[in-house]
Amino acid sequence: MKNWAANLTYSSARIERPRTLAELAGIVAGEPRVRALGSRHSFCDVADTKGVHVQLDLLDDGRPALEVDPATGVASVRAGLRYGEVAADLHARGRALTAMASLPHISVAGAVATGTHGSGDGTRSLAGDVVGLELMTASGAVLTLRRGDADFPGSVVALGALGVVTRVELATVPAFDVRQDVFTGLPWDALFDNLDAVLGSAYSVSIFTSWFEPDVRLVWCKSRVDDGAGAAPALPVELGAAPATRPMHPLPDVDAAACTEQGGVPGPWFERLPHFRLDFTPSLGEELQSEYLLPRAAGADAVRALRALGDRLGPLLLTSEIRTVAGDDLWLSTAPGDSLAFHFTWRQDWPAVRAVLPELEAALLPLGARPHWGKLFTVPVADLPGLYPRFGDFAELAARLDPTGKFRGGYVEALLAP
Ligand SMILES: Cc1cc2nc3c(=O)[nH]c(=O)nc-3n(C[C@H](O)[C@H](O)[C@H](O)COP(=O)(O)OP(=O)(O)OC[C@H]3O[C@@H](n4cnc5c(N)ncnc54)[C@H](O)[C@@H]3O)c2cc1C
C-alpha cells in the first residue's frame, strides 16, 4: 500500500478495516504494533508502522456518524470521516467550521494529528478547533479527553502516537457564505512592503508564487459575504495586481476544473474555503510537498530569504503558497502563536528536492520555522523536540498511555526514542 502521492510504500504487514469498536479493540489489544492510518495524504512516513495498520473508514461505533449538540454547537464526528463529508453534513444543519484545508479529502483524525491548517489571520488550524476526542489506548479501552483536561493539549496533534482516535469533537459556528476573488501579477516590492496587509485583506488569503517569477503569480482571497465583505477586496488591485479574467489553478498551466468556484460568486463556506473540490483530484497528484510554519514577525524576512533562493527553488517547484494561521495552545502545534505558513509543492523528484531542502531550512529555521509534521523535511528528527517547549510533556504522555511503544512507527519511533 502506498500513500496518496505514491512516493512512499508503507511497511505494514497488513491493513485492517474494523467495522465495530469491539473489532478495533481486539486488534489494538492483540497486536504488538498498531498504527492508525487516515486517508494517506501525508508525504512522509509519519503514519508508518512495521505492524498492523488500522483504517477507520468503515468503523461504525454505534452512534450517528455526526451529531451536533444544539446547546454548544459542538459536533461529534466519527474520526475516519473525511472533512468534506463532515462539512457538507454540518452545512445542511446550518453549522460551519471556521477553516478548511486546501483539500476536503483528508480524514478528520489524520488531519488534526499532524496540525493541518487552512488560511486566515483569525482562524486556527483544524486541530485548534478540536474540543474533545475519544482515544482507544493500548489496552483497547476508550479514553475521553476534553478541552480543560490536563492531557488534552498533548492529545490532538499527536502523530498517532497515543492510540487510535475513534471520535473527534469540533467547535462549529453558524454557517456562512464566502466569495473567492483571484488576482494576478502582484509586484514583489508591493508584497515586501505590504505582506501583512495583503494576507489580511480577506477572511482567508493564499499567495501563490514559484519565487523566481518576475511578479507574484496569484493572490487568492476568500471573503465572508455576511460580514460586510460583499465586494472583492480592493487592496491587491491598489497594489498593482489585476483581477483574474478566468478561473485559476494554484499550479501554473493546470486547468481549474478541480478548483472551487472563483470569480466572486458567493457560495457555502465548505465549497469555497478549500481550493479543491471533493469529487476531483486535488493539486496534481504527481508531486511532493514540504511546509514550514514561522512566527508572524518573521514573515517579511522569510519572504525576502525565499525570493533570494528563487533560482534554486523555482525549477523544482510546481507552486509555493503563503498562508496565515492563528495560534493555539496544543503542545505539538506548528502554530503556537499567530503564524505564517510557507508551503512548497515540488516536482516528484525526491533526490533533487532532498538536495535543496537543507538550503531552504538553513534560511527558515533561524527565523523560528517548524516543519509540517505530515510533509517532507530534512531537519534531523533529533532536533525536532527542541522546537517544542512542551515536547517533554508529550513524550511523558505517550510513555504513560503507550508504555510498550505499540503506536510508534515511521519517524515518530525515533522522535519518541528514549
Ligand atoms: C494535495 C494535498 C493538499 C494538502 N493540503 C494541506 C493543507 O491545505 N494544509 C495542511 O496543513 N496540510 C495539507 N496537506 C497535508 C495533509 O493535510 C496532512 O498530511 C494530513 O495529516 C493528512 O491526513 P490523512 O487523513 O491523510 O492522514 P494520514 O496521512 O493517513 O496520517 C497522518 C497521521 O495521522 C495519524 N492518524 C490517522 N488517523 C488516526 C486516528 N484515527 N487516530 C490517531 N491517529 C491517526 C496517523 O497515524 C499519522 O500519524 C495536504 C496534502 C495533500 C496530499
Image (cartoon, rainbow, N blue to C red):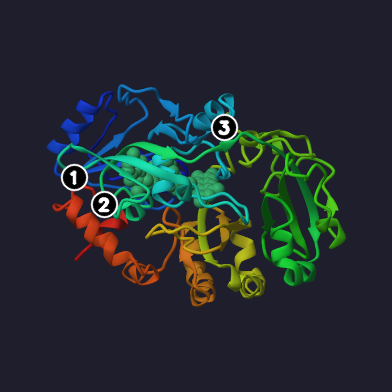
Name the amino acid type tagged 1.
Answer: Arg
The residue depicted at 20 percent of the width and 50 percent of the height is: 401
Give the left or right position of residue 26, taking residue 174 as reference.
left
Q: Which residue is mark 2?
A: 409
Q: Residue at x 45, y 52 (%)?
A: 115
Residue type for callout 2: Gly
Nearer to the camera, 112 or 303? 112
Q: Residues within 10 Å of mark 3 (few under 14, many from 20)?
A: many
Measured Cα–Cα span from mark 2 to mark 3: 37 Å
Residue at x-position 53% and y-position 72%: 364
x and y percentages locating residue 250 in the rendered image: 67, 48
Residue 406 shown left or right of residue 151 in the figure: left
Dot placed on the residue nearer the N-terminal end, 2 or 3: 3
Residue linked to disc 1: 33
Q: Determine whether the beta carbon of the residue marked 2 sits less than 8 angstroms from the nearest atom of ligand 1.
A: yes
Front: mark 2 or 3: 3
Residue beneath the point at 76% across and 72% down:
193
Q: Is residue 373 above or below residue 223?
A: below
Circles 2 and 1: CB distance less than 8 Å? yes
User: Horizontal and vertical percent for residue 311?
Assistant: 65, 70
Is the distance from the Cβ of mark 1 to the nearest ligand 1 atom less than 8 Å?
no
User: Mark 1 or mark 3: which comes first in sequence?
Assistant: 1
Circle 3: residue type: Arg
Q: Which mark is residue 95?
A: 3
The disc, 2 or 1, on the residue closer to the chain's N-terminal end is 1
Density class for disc 2 (Cα within 10 Å; few <14, some 14-19, many ≥20) is many
Residue 413's spot in the image, x, y percent? 25, 57
| Mark 2, secondary structure of its residue | loop
When the figure is inspected, residue 137 is found, relative to residue 381, above or below; the finding is: above
